[in-house]
C-alpha cells in the first residue's frame, strides 16, 4: 500500500468530480441517501416505468462502485478487498425488483457496514438497470501492532477491515497502544494513539516521514511518551504528543526544527546516531559503538 497521501473522488478531505459512464434516460430515478429513500420529481412509478424496468433487469442487477483512487486515478484499495465488497453487495441485493428502493437500501447498508466508508453512502439506479454507489471512503493512515498482527486504521483511528502479519502492511506502525482493539468500523480510543496520529500528521506536513518506520507510544510509567523509530532502527525520543508538552519540553515546532537541522547536516533523520533525545533545550545523542 502506498504511503503517500491519497486523494479520492468521494472523500470529504479531497473531493474530486468523477465522470459518469452512463446517463439516466428514464424520467424516474430513485436515490438512497443518509439512510432514507427519496423519490425525486413527479415520482410515482407509472406503467411506463414498470414496463421499462421489466425489460432492463432480469435477476440481480449490475453494480458499479465509485472506488477510492489516488491523484493519478489509480484505485488504491486491494483488488481482493474490492472483490469481496462487490460480492457482499451482490448477495444483499439478489432478487431485488428493478428500479425499486429496496435493492438500493440493501446496497447502502452493506457498504456502510463494511467499515470502509464514513457516513452513509449514496445509491442510484441508472437507465440500464445498474446500481451506482458513491461513498466517502476512509483513508488508511497507519497500522497498530497488537499480538502478531498489524491492524489498519484511518486518520480518525477507525479500524479498517484489513490486517497483516507483522511487517507486511507497508504502513507506518504504532506499538504499545493502551486501549484494546475495537471492532471494525469503530474508533480506537486512547489519548496515546490520538497523540501518535497527531505526530504522524505533523511529520507528514513537514516532509519528515520518509525515514520513519513507526512510533512507540510507551508503556507503564512511560505511556504517552512517544519515541520515533527510524528505518535504520534508531530511537528518536520525541516526548508528549503535539500540543501536550510536559514541563521542560520544547514545543512541537522546535522539535521539528531540530529534526530538520539534523537531516540537513547528515542526510539522515537520526543523524547516523543510535539514540536521540530532542525534548529539551539541548539535543542528547548516543553514538553507535564501533
Image: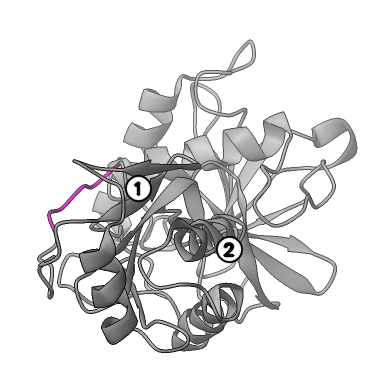
> Gap in Å between the C-alphas at discs 2 and 1?
33 Å
Q: Residue at x 63, y 10 (%)?
A: 247
Say whether residue 178 is left or right of residue 145: right
251 over 225 or under it: above or below: above
Residue 204, numbered circle = 1
Instruction: Give residue 205's position: percent from left, percent from top.
Output: 30, 42
Can residue 24 be seen at all in this image of the molecule? Answer: yes
Secondary structure under badge 2?
Answer: helix
Residue drawn at 26 percent across, 45 percent down: 43
Residue picked out by circle 2: 110
Answer with the quarter of the image where residue 192 lies. top right
**Magenta extent:** 13-17
Prevailing SS of the magenta stretch = loop
Please tell me which residue is depicted at 19% across the width and 72% down the height of the picture: 127
Q: Dot 1 lies on which element?
A: helix
The image quadrant that residue 252 belongs to is: top left
Amino acid at each position: 500500500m502506498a504511503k503517500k497521501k491519497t486523494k479520492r473522488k468521494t472523500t470529504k478531505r479531497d473531493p474530486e468530480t468523477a465522470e459518469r459512464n452512463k446517463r439516466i434516460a428514464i424520467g424516474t430515478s430513485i436515490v438512497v441517501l443518509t439512510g432514507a429513500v427519496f423519490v425525486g420529481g413527479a415520482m410515482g412509478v407509472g406503467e411506463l416505468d414498470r414496463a421499462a424496468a421489466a425489460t432492463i433487469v432480469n435477476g440481480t442487477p449490475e453494480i458499479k462502485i465509485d472506488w477510492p483512487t489516488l491523484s493519478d486515478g489509480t484505485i488504491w484499495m486491494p483488488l481482493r478487498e474490492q472483490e469481496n465488497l462487490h460480492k457482499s453487495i451482490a448477495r444483499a441485493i439478489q432478487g431485488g425488483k428493478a428500479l425499486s428502493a429496496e435493492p438500493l437500501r440493501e446496497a447502502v447498508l452493506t457498504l456502510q457496514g463494511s467499515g470502509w466508508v464514513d457516513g452513509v453512502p449514496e445509491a442510484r439506479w441508472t437507465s440500464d438497470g445498474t446500481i451506482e454507489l458513491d461513498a466517502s471512503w476512509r483513508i488508511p493512515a497507519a497500522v497498530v501492532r497488537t499480538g502478531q498482527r498489524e491492524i489498519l486504521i484511518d486518520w480518525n483511528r477507525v479500524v479498517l477491515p484489513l490486517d497483516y502479519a507483522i511487517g507486511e502492511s507497508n504502513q507506518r506502525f504504532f506499538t504499545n497502544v493502551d486501549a484494546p482493539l475495537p471492532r471494525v468500523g469503530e474508533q480506537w480510543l486512547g489519548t496515546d494513539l490520538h497523540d501518535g496520529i497527531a505526530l504522524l500528521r505533523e511529520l507528514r506536513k513537514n516532509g519528515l516521514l520518509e525515514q520513519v518506520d513507526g512510533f512507540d507510544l510507551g508503556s507503564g510509567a512511560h505511556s504517552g511518551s512517544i519515541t520515533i523509530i527510524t528505518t535504520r532502527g534508531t530511537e528518536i525520543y520525541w516526548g508528549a504528543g503535539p500540543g501536550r508538552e510536559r514541563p521542560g519540553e520544547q514545543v512541537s515546532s522546535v522539535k521539528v526544527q531540530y529534526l530538520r537541522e539534523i537531516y540537513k547536516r547528515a542526510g539522515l533523520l537520526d543523524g547516523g546516531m543510535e539514540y536521540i533525545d530532542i525534548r529539551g533545550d539541548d539535543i542528547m545523542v548516543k553514538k553507535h559503538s564501533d
